[in-house]
Image (tube, rainbow, N blue to C red):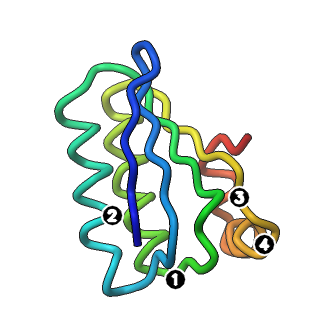
Amino acid sequence: MHIEREQLGSEVVLKVAGRLDTPNAKPFEASLMEVVTTTDGGLLVNLAGVDYVSSSGLRALLVAGKAMRTAKRKLTLSSLQPQIREVFDISGFSTLFEIT
């Protein structure tokens, strides 16, 4: 898994590539939570490069999403590949996040 961080105005963009599976979930969650705890703006997670997501990867997003909602900030997901979008739809995660 590879994560690039970019600042666009007040929003942080995390571009993620690879698999969001059990071995990668903790580092992914740490990257998300670093943004949550060290910035004041929104968070956009670009998942265009993600080709697999497990329940561990979904959990990392859920933890970050809850923290962002608590802070009254916006977490947006973008560029989901069709098979990843299907996982989000089937699991109900499509209703928990704004997806562009």
Q: Residues within 10 Å of mark 2 (few under 14, many from 20)?
A: many
Q: Is residue 1 above or below residue 23?
A: above
**What amino acid type should be assigned to the residue bearing mark 4?**
Glu
Which residue is identified by label 3? 80
Q: CA distance from mark 2 to mark 3?
A: 16 Å
**Which disc, if any, is residue 28?**
2
Q: Position of residue 44 (x, y in %)?
A: 51, 37
**What amino acid type should be assigned to the residue bearing mark 2?**
Phe
**Which disc, if any, is residue 36?**
none
Q: Quadrant of residue 99?
A: top right
**Which disc, if any, is residue 86?**
4
Frontmost residue, 52 versus 33: 52
**What amino acid type should be assigned to the residue bearing mark 1?**
Ser
Q: Residues within 10 Å of mark 4 (few under 14, many from 20)?
A: some
Q: CA distance from mark 2 to mark 4?
A: 21 Å
Could you tell me which secondary element the residue under label 3 belongs to? loop
**What amino acid type should be assigned to the residue bearing mark 3?**
Leu
Q: Is residue 63 left or right of residue 77?
A: left
**Which disc, if any, is residue 54?**
1
